[in-house]
Amino acid sequence: MLSRPLLILDIDETLIHGREEPLDRPCEFRAGQYHIYERPHLSQFLDVVSEQYDLACWSSATHDYLEIVVNTITNNLDEPLLFVWDRSRCTRRTDFTLQEEYFLKDLQKIKKKGFDLERVLILEDEPRKVNRHFGNAIFVRPYLGALDDNELPKLASYLESIASISNFRDLEKRNWRSIAEKL
Ligand SMILES: [Mg+2]
């Protein structure tokens, strides 16, 4: 019997787009000074994937911002997220080429919590944030507010189709979008 898989959600530019200056339409809600735009089909996406996956969130955002965003977008879910991790759980790294800092999500921390990484997936729009664990990652196109964005319905179909695979790390996932389009 396979354990229930864990899907770790990124927030910014994966599920929502938050910005200080509003777009040319009203935002769905505010988090502090940020206008938050939900990626189209977000609530349906969370509904569908929560049937087969335990959900959690790991973001490099700050605690207070994350709390507002996560509480708002998961408000209608039957089951709470298993955990919500913020920037303090990330590892600070420097990209010397770009001369900037970024935050790494080291999945060894998930393993230490007792999760079997073969049954863990992490959604990300920024590959370098999971660069030690590409085998667990599904990369999405960054969401910047487009109303015709269709990434989440495709992703939900794909995630449903692979939920019973025993080792996600062995699965080629870079082609997920083209597979989803054929489902
Ligand atoms: Mg992101």
Image (cartoon, grey):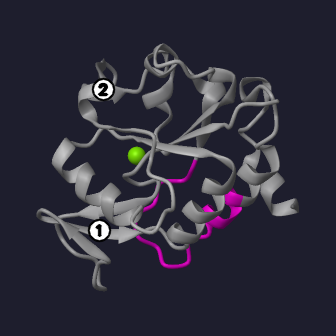
Viewer-nearest residue: 146 or 12: 12
Q: Position of residue 113 (x, y in %)?
A: 46, 19
The magenta stretch is: 140-156
Give the residue at mark 1: 36
> Where residue 118 sits: x, y (%)?
69, 23
Look at the numbered disc 1 and say if its residue's Cβ is closer than 8 Å to ligand 1.
no
Q: 130 or 157: which is nearer to us?
A: 157
- The amino acid pointed to by label 2 is Arg
86 falls in the magenta region? no
- Please state, as top left, top right, bottom left or bottom right, where the N terminus lies in the image: top right
Residue 142 or residue 165, whichever sits in front: 165
Q: In this rendering, would 41 be left or right of 82?
A: right
Please name the residue shown 30% across and 59% down the image: 69
Labels 1, 2: front one: 2
Query: Where, by quadrant of the figure, is residue 59 drawn?
Result: top left
Residue drawn at the location 83% of the way across and 52% of the way down: 179
In the rendered image, which quarter contains the C terminus? Answer: bottom right
Kindly state the secondary structure of the residue where label 2 is placed.
helix
Residue at the disc numbered 2: 89
Three-letter residue code for mark 1:
Ile
Q: Which quadrant holds residue 166?
A: top right
Crowding around mark 2 (Cα neighbors within 10 Å: few <14, some 14 to 19, many 20+) is some
Please tell me the numbered disc located at residue 72.
Answer: none
Q: In this view, does 151 lie to the left or right of 182?
A: left
Disc on the earlier residue, 1 or 2 = 1
Name the residue located 49 percent from the left edge and 79 percent from the top edge. Answer: 147
Image coordinates of residue 135 in percent, x first then y, are 66, 25
